[in-house]
Structures are given as structure tokens and as C-alpha cells.
Amino acid sequence: MKYSFKNDYAEGAHPLVLEALVRSNLTQQNGYGLDEFSVNSERIIQQKMKNPKAKVFLVSGGTQANLIVISAFLRPHESVVSAATGHIFTNESGAIEATGHKVHGIENTDGKIRPADIQKLIDAHQNKPHQVKQKMVYISNSTELGTIYSKKELIDLYQFCQEKNLYLFVDGARLGHALTAETNDLTLEDFGRYTDAFYLGGTKNGALIGEAIVINNENLQEEFGFHLKQKGAMLAKGRLLGIQFQELLKDDLYFDLAKHANEQAMKIKEAFKQIGCDFLCETFTNQIFPILNNNQIDQLSTDFDFYVWKKLDEEKAAVRLITSWATSDKIIKKFINEIKNLK
Amino acid sequence: MKYSFKNDYAEGAHPLVLEALVRSNLTQQNGYGLDEFSVNSERIIQQKMKNPKAKVFLVSGGTQANLIVISAFLRPHESVVSAATGHIFTNESGAIEATGHKVHGIENTDGKIRPADIQKLIDAHQNKPHQVKQKMVYISNSTELGTIYSKKELIDLYQFCQEKNLYLFVDGARLGHALTAETNDLTLEDFGRYTDAFYLGGTKNGALIGEAIVINNENLQEEFGFHLKQKGAMLAKGRLLGIQFQELLKDDLYFDLAKHANEQAMKIKEAFKQIGCDFLCETFTNQIFPILNNNQIDQLSTDFDFYVWKKLDEEKAAVRLITSWATSDKIIKKFINEIKNLK
Amino acid sequence: MKYSFKNDYAEGAHPLVLEALVRSNLTQQNGYGLDEFSVNSERIIQQKMKNPKAKVFLVSGGTQANLIVISAFLRPHESVVSAATGHIFTNESGAIEATGHKVHGIENTDGKIRPADIQKLIDAHQNKPHQVKQKMVYISNSTELGTIYSKKELIDLYQFCQEKNLYLFVDGARLGHALTAETNDLTLEDFGRYTDAFYLGGTKNGALIGEAIVINNENLQEEFGFHLKQKGAMLAKGRLLGIQFQELLKDDLYFDLAKHANEQAMKIKEAFKQIGCDFLCETFTNQIFPILNNNQIDQLSTDFDFYVWKKLDEEKAAVRLITSWATSDKIIKKFINEIKNLK
Amino acid sequence: MKYSFKNDYAEGAHPLVLEALVRSNLTQQNGYGLDEFSVNSERIIQQKMKNPKAKVFLVSGGTQANLIVISAFLRPHESVVSAATGHIFTNESGAIEATGHKVHGIENTDGKIRPADIQKLIDAHQNKPHQVKQKMVYISNSTELGTIYSKKELIDLYQFCQEKNLYLFVDGARLGHALTAETNDLTLEDFGRYTDAFYLGGTKNGALIGEAIVINNENLQEEFGFHLKQKGAMLAKGRLLGIQFQELLKDDLYFDLAKHANEQAMKIKEAFKQIGCDFLCETFTNQIFPILNNNQIDQLSTDFDFYVWKKLDEEKAAVRLITSWATSDKIIKKFINEIKNLK
């Protein structure tokens, strides 16, 4: 069977996470997120962010986190601004619109949006109340193209949002990977300070399932539980989420796993560079997008699975390779050997 | 007071329409669209289209027509494709999304969309079920830029939609103006044949209010009344709509009024051409978009009101001028005089 | 043809209303509710209520008013409490639920609800956040059974709502009839003081269409226009609504018409009483519900149309008779004659 | 710490389920429900039901299952009928209404509804299109009161639904407990035959999370995946659900666990009967509702946790006790001893 670089959720959970589930299995716990592990996870996140007023809500997936946060924060006539490459704009089967809200997609080349882009959109929506009102900015970090925001970029966005009365919400399905990238200068603390809300993704970083929604803006915390319940996100056995996040966060396993994934990706990237390969965009996280010719793609496909991301011309395409906490040195070595043998 | 060329709904109704309201005022009628006038309007439209199986539903405005048709026809996971200039994409305050559906906006220069544009969008949404499913194409005729579709363009679109299992829905807020434009080769009959549904706009063509939704696709007619009621569109005194459409349609007053509006616009267009003016796009309906310099705009603004539509540079902008059934020869003469005096 | 007592919207508009439309027909006006007449209608209502801070929004129908007010005021997890006989609970084809909100229906015998009923409902919904949060109380005055609230009842409800952090919203489709009933002790001023919002119905009291939504609670006024637009309620020719309300309200024509309707109903009621008839509930507005046997119903049905409201047993049923501003003395006389001849 | 009889989800998963997760942890699998385990779970369910055309979709919780099934099956103007005690009517924070659909609640004493109840509701909604259209019947088995449907009752309901063009959907959060109750005469095969859709609950019967939605009606299977995705229910690691259901179903562990829970409950029930206790309603599944006086409740509360379900008067209340796959003989013995000591 081929080894898959198609995504970072092909395996189960990190063994320590499973052990924690087994260990705690027979203790009785309160349901619906009131178990000791969920409570503890909130405390750990508050401490790591040095923001004791933040509230944490654990849910089972990213689309779920996005649709609940956005529909809970916005009033009916308000819209959310995203990169056109953003997950909510293009890969959630209309989940946000299904809650009643327009998503604006801003064209971009690196998965990121900047204040000037948003300002232009706002300028084009001044015919009130005939045009929808922008009220939230949604970004991903790392982005769907594997790129990351710098500290300056995040602060600029947040200040812009503050001035324009917009909420800033960060999709952190791969926040671990962003924060452990070699070029990163942001910390979890920054996310507690320069966002209204964000989430820490578990599914793509060692958990079976789980995203930890963190709401910093106190005005937006109130009655959030109702929205979880109404959207079917409040697990009876919330312990399943609590145990996993407690295990991942208590000793920084979460960041170790993400760092491992990034490092494996960087090794592959380096190998492609060695043979003179270009990339769709330069990334330092666990997603890389080398540009290959059709022969090279065929060759690599013999033993490995990955997505052809974007055809560039008849001869060439960018492929997407994703590594994870579970990508072993042995596999990397084997893959790099194949790269070296590419023509 | 300035004369306004800002829109085609600045006056009330054509006097014959008001007379019909007065004449019928004291006869008792059934409520909720079951009055004799609404029934009669449906029959007249069926006859004009030579499509006795079409169903007609009268509603009070265009946004209402759009949101009801779209939400009634689509299932929750289906989306609608529009020009980025389309009314539903940009000027209805998120009305379609508020019913749960994504609207895709296709960039364009003339307000129109073509099969190739739609195909490209469909190609970019093949990752099912992660991406939303396109199920309807929405066009306006005349468009928001005053342009119109040719018979070939409409048939091409309809055939494409049939092949791709998409509904074709036409926003006809200004369908009268489109069908009476000098360059038009479409008939009402064509709209009964080459669309799944469309509406005939009354508000912008001599009625106080009212749009006549026509559903040709018999599968989509069923239980449509529930949607009218649920969205607050079923007027107790549906007679108000029925009387107006009967009066406008029985002797082609509807088309006479639209033709008048177009002719007045063409006179203005000709005057601008005479002084060497360019246009944002060439139109033959009641909306024209001459490109003027700031001085010219100021000069014309002394006695006339209109929108500056699009700044082109520091010196120049396209303005939008709209005529209506009520635009008199006297006003046109006066305005043309002003144009002649422009520097 | 039979004369219909089925509803109060079988005729067009009061002649003075039509005259006002004709008179103003050719003056150019701003669109979308910014015409001078709509602005003036707001001022008149503010003055009559002695509440200059109230905001008025004119829409075309009652279901539309209900769904816009409720969806604009509530957040996604909040619900509205209604009588089980309330229009929103049973006669709007799920319009409120279609905007995402649960409607609770409280069983009752007279169309009204009281604080104790609501408290009981709240008590049964304490398992938060698993149960929906009640945030609004909706009442109709006059009710769907023709009954009215007394001043004490309204104040009690409002104080209860204030204590419980609930909005009080009054459906006034027939508010004119309530305020001119012989047993009424409420004033328009009271509705400006003891409600968060209400509307004054025009459709059932002399207008062609139109309901005037009045928002007293200043926190709820903000950005309301967006909701009108998004739900398709913002008429391009808002003047149609403005002119009618100005005409109806400026000299109290509105109240004169309602009083006339009530008086005609009372004459019929008296005639039924004379022959020893019972009523489903005692009313003093333009809706009466005499209990008749099948023979009597058949007899009256020869020349008159009305609804059989509720079968009581094999022999008897309550019928509903509605009078309007247009119900003439001649018709009343004829109908009373028929009543006298009933066996 | 007290032992909790508050619910059947206080512990984690059955040890065999955890072992299966550990065993399969490092094999790479396709995401989003395309893993071999999910595929296999579908096949097992099809085989057990002898219905190879049924489709199975695994989701994480009951509210999620309910809202997706109902919103996917219904068109905007259609409603669902439930017992007033039904989970969707009263305990899902308006989840169904948030997707746009009215839920009708039928009053009852035993958690069940019958054709005659539904017919009465339909009869009261004949004023179309002003009243919402009933299109689905939702029942729970076992019900929220622990009762179960007999084979005759299910077939009667299904035939009624077929005649009335209603879908029948069964909430099987505790279907295992229903099917293993000593008074049960239904089989899984019956649920494949006499329902349009139902789900098999895992969360309350030995899984960490998971409900298996089974769609029998082929017309309703199409494109169901879009709805899962749009509502945030499509887990990247769908394997988490697939592995659990495969483990629970392959050797009937699912039914063994439910039977155990029922038996433990029956032992408690018998003990209460021995001391002369009455019950709110007689049940044969894992929920029992003995009626106790306040002293008895206090006494039992010393070492055990449970809900006071319904106050009956100042002195007495029905409490709810729930057992699970994890309730040990030792605990039962201890609790029965306490019961014997009650005054």
C-alpha cells in the first residue's frame, strides 16, 4: 500500500492521547463539557495565554467550530470576510451561508489577507442598508497554502479590525504548525491578545478529534453554550475532548508534535530544492507545494499518495504534500531517496 | 427642486393604473392572490407567452421575488451562480444567504455571464461533498449595467443549464426595457420557453409595486404558495397587484411604457455622443453610463440628480442616468440643452 | 353575489387614501422609505404617542412585520412566546421558524396570555443550554379571537417582561379596532410606553396595504433597515406606504374607520343576542363568533359568506363574522333582518 | 464521591471499543467517512437489517443526527411532528427550528405518539398555504420516558405515514435498550423496513461518541453527504466512528451492553416495587421513574446522584434513574440495600 502525504489526519491519535483515554475510562464524569478534563483544559489554555478571562469550548471539528463561532457572533445582516482560499469560503459546502451569513472571498496569492484588501471591500459596500454589513474577519494560520502570519501582520489586522469595529477570528486548525514554524514570531499569548476568538486544532495534530475554541472578547462569551448545543456540537461525553486536550497541552506535546511535522516537511522541501524544484509558495509548516513535471509526479506516485493541487500548464503542476506528527524518519528517508532519483 | 435621473421609481404609478385601482375599489374580492384580477393577470401572461402551463405569482418587490424563488427551488446544499454585478450578489443585504444559500459572483465587464464562466466555476467545485453544489444560474435582463441578452445568448445559457442540471432564473425587474430595446431580438414567449422561471418587473415600469413571478418548470410550481406565505409576500389584498398587472398587460401598456423610457434614454445618449462622450458600456435600455469629467458632473448636477457610478481616475467618472415611463419630453429637452453646453 | 363577512380586506382602500395616492402621484420622491410621506408618517406617530424617540418602519403586511421584527430582535438561541391561537404560531406557514426561532404556543381560551402562563413556560425551560432561551413575548391586540387587552393587563405583561428580560412585541394588525372598542381603556400612548415594539395595521383598516412597525426600545432600533432590506420588505416606492399612513393618521381617519367597523359588528352581535344566541367569546371589536346550529348557518349562507370557525358538536358551530370600514348600514340592516328570521 | 445514576454517558467507552481504537491506531485511512471501518460498519448494519440498499452515515451525536436528517429531508415549508416530550421539541435548544423548520409537540403521557394524534394535528392545519405543511413524524425508541413501541405500534405509524405522505424518522439514541427490553417484539430488521430513516445510538451504549444514521428510503439517500459536511458533522477522522461501530456491532456487543443496562434497571425497579413504590410510567429499559417522598429522596441522595424528574405535590416527586453498560452488580447491590432501608 502507498504511503499517503494527502493530509495530516490519516492516522489515529498520538499514543499518549490514547493512553490518557484508557487511563480515565471508567471514572464517572459530568456530561456536556462539564467534566474535570474539559475544565482543566480551559485552565491550561488560559495559563499558557496569560489570559484568565478567556473562555474555552471544545468541539469536534473545524467546520463545526467555524459555523458556530460565526453564527453566534454575527447578527443576521452581518457578513464575514475571508481569503478566497479560506476554508469557509470554498471548502465547507456552504456551512456559513447555511447559518444565514454571506462570506466575502478576497483574491490572494499566498492564502493571507491584509487591511488594505478588507478596506477595499468595505469601500465597495457603502450603500447601506442595501448592501450587507461586514462585521468579522476570518483568517487561517497556518493558511490553506501552508503560509503563516507574522506578528506584525496579526497586530496590523487586529488594530484595523478594532478601528473598523470588526471581529477578528482565527481558524487554527493548524495553529500548532504555524507557531512552531522556523520563521514564526507569534506566541499563543499573542493569540489571546490580538484576536477576538480563535481555535487550536487537535484533529490535525495528534488528537482523534477536537478543536479548542478560545473566546477572548468577553462580550462574545456570553451564552455561547446555547450555540454549541443548538448546532449539535455539545458532546454528551465531552470528556473525550477534554482528556485529549489536557494530554496534548499539559506538557507541550501539542507543540512537539507540530514541530515534528514541520521538520519532516522541511526535509522534503530541502530535497526538492536540491534538485532545483520551484514551489507554488514558500512555506515553513507541514504543507509544501513543489512544482513538478508530469513524469516526476508519475514517478513519485508509484509508492506515495498526494494531491495534485494546481495544474500550471500542460507539463507542470504544483502538488501538495502534508506531513504529520506520525510521519516517521524512515518514510521521509525513503521519500527523499525517490526525490533524488527524479529526472 | 432638481429633477432626478437617479432611478425609475421616483414617481407613483402610470395614471391608467391608478384609475384601475379607483374603478375596482369597492368590489369585494378574495384575499391572498385569489382575486379575479390576479387570476386574470396569470391568464394574460400565459397567453402572451403561449404557455398555458406556466404559473404566475405576484409579489411586491424584486428582492422578495429573488429570495423566494431561490429558497423555494434550492435544497440546503445548493448554490446559485450570479454575475458579480448581479443584484442578489451585491445589493440585497445578504437576502439570499439569509435563506441559507451561497451566491457565487462571476466577475464580468458587461453585467452578463456566459456558459464558459459558469463551467469554470463548476470545475473549481468538484471536491464533493466538501464544496457546495451549484444548482441555479441567475441572470438579470436588462442587467444592472443596462445591457441585454441576445436570443442566442439566452438559448446558449438555457441549453448549458439543461445539460448541467442547473435551473435558469431571470431577474426581470427591467424585463420590459430589455424587450423593447432597439437591439433586442427576444420575446416574452422566449422567456416562457428558455427559462425555468423569471419575473416581469412592475415597480420600475409604471406600477406602484409589483413583480410577476412566472414559473415555467412544472416541477418547481408545486406548493409555491407556501413559500410566498412563509416569506411574508402573500398580500391580504393581492388585488392591489392583480389590478395593476391586468391594467399594464391587457393592452401592452407595459411595453409602451418601457419603450418610452428607452427612447428618452437614447435621446440623452445621442446628445452625449454628439459632444464626444464615451460610455462605461454601450446600452440600449433606460440606463446609460456616460463618462464625464468632474466639471461636467458639477455642471449637470446644478439642476439634475444622478449617481456617480464609478470613479475612473482623479478627473473622470462614469455617471448613471435612468429614465422612466414618466420622463417627459420637456425634461429631456432641457437636459439635452445642458449637455450641449457642457465644456 | 354573496356579501362576504369573511374578512376585513375584501375591498380596496378608503376613498380618501386613494385620492391621496392620485394627488401625489407625479411628484418625484426618494425611494426606499426616504420619501417625505414616510418621514411624515413617522413624525405623526411619534406625536400621537408623545414618544419622539420611537422609530417607525412601514412594511407591506403582517406576516412580514412579524418575521422581520422577531428575527431582527432575537439572537439565534432565543425563542418567542405566543398564544397558541397567535398568528405567528398557527397561521404564518412557519415564517418565524424559517428565520431560525422557536415559537412557543400557550393554550388559552380567549386569545390572550398572562404572566403566569409565561412563567410556567420559563420554569419548564431551566435546563440551560439544552433548552431554548425565551426572550420575547408576542401578543395580538385585538387578538385572533377579537378580544382585547385592558390597560392593567398590558402593564402587567410589560412589567413582567421587564423583570424577566423579555421583549414585549404587539401584533397590531387590528390595533385600530382594539383602541376604539367600547370596552377599551388603552391609548396609542400606552403602546409607546408599555411595549418594546408594536405595529399599527393598515391592511385591515382602510389601506391598500401597509403596517407601521413602531420600535420604542432604542437598543432595538439600530440598523433595523438592514433587516427590512434583507427580508425583501423595503419597497422601492416606499411612498405607497407613506402616503397611505399619512392620510390615515393625520386626522384620525384610522380610528374613525376602526370605530365604524366595530359599531357595525356590535349591531350584528346585538341582533344575535336578541334571538338568544351564545358566543364563543365575548368581543367588542370587529370580529364576532356567534354559536349557531347547522340550519341557521345554512340559512345565513344563502346571501352571506363567512367562516365556520369551530365545530362544537354535530349540531352546532361557532362562526366568525368580520366587519370593516367598508361595511355599509344597508348591508347590516339586510343581515340583521336575516338574523331575525332565523329559526 | 457519589455514584451517578443521572445518565448513561458518565463513563468512557466499553474496553473492547478502546482496544479496537488502539489496535488500528497507526494504519493510514481515508478521511471523511471513507475509511475501511466506516464502510464495514455500513455493511454490517445492512446485513443485520437484511436491507442491502440502506445507507449508513456515522455522526458524533444525537442532536446532530436529528438536525441533519430533518433539515436534509424537509423542504422549507414543511414541518415535523414530535411528542411534546420528544428530544427535538424540548431538549435541543431550538436546533431544528434553527434549520428553519417548525416542530409540533403532541401532548402525551407515555412519551409516544399514535396515528390519531397526528391526524388531529393535520386536521387543524388545513388552511393551506397559510399553515405549515406536516411532512415528517419523529419518534424516539426507547422514548425519553423509557417506554418502547411495540411492533404493531410501529407498523401502524409507518402505514399511517405512508398514507399521509409523511416520512417516519426514529431517534434511536437508546435503540439498543429498546430492542433488548424484555417486553420488546421489534427487531433491527423491522427498523429497516418500517421507517424512512432511524439511527442507532452509540454514545449511550458503550461508544465514546457516535450515532449511526440509517436511511432506508432511497429517495432520501441522495447527496446526504453534503448535509453532513455543511452542518459540521463530517469528521476528518471518520475512522473514530467507524472503528467503534464495527466493534460494537460485529459480535452483537451493542445488544449485550444494552441488555445489561436494562437488567440492572429492572433489578432496581423490582426493589422499589418490593417496598410498594409507584412509578411515573412503567418501563422495561434502562430508565426508571419511581415516585418517592422527599425523605426517601434525601436518603438515597446521600450516596447516589440522580435527577428529580417531576414534582407531583409538596411531598412527592418522580425521580429518574438511568443505568448503563457500565453499571456494576456491586453498585446495584449497594443501591438496592439503600432502597430496602428506605422509610
Image: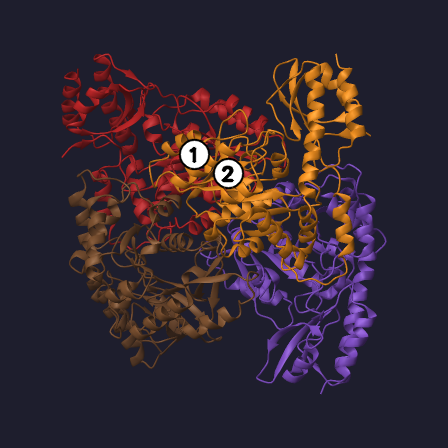
Chain colours: A orange, B red, C brown, D purple
Quarter-of-image position of residue C46 = bottom left
Residue type at numbered disc 1: Phe
Chain ID, mark 2: A
Classify mark 1: residues with Cα within 10 Å, few (<14), some (14-19) or many (20+).
Answer: many
Where residue C38 appears, as percent x and y from the top left, is 23, 48
Which of these two is toward me, C37 or C128? C128
Quadrant where the C terminus of chain A is found in the figure: top right
Residue that lies at the very extreme toward the right in this rendered image: D251
Residue type at numbered disc 2: Tyr
Q: Can residue A87 be seen here?
A: yes
Which of these two is toward me, D159 or B124? B124
Q: State how far apart marks 2 and 1 are (Cα).
A: 20 Å
Residue that lies at the very extreme toward the bottom in this rendered image: D343
SS under mark 1: helix
Quarter-of-image position of residue C270 = bottom left
Give the vertical position of D37 relative to D171 (above or below). above
Residue designated by label 2: A138
Label disc, if present, on residue B89 of the rendered structure? 1
Where residue B322 appears, as percent x and y from the top left, is 26, 28
Quadrant where the N terminus of chain A is found in the figure: top right
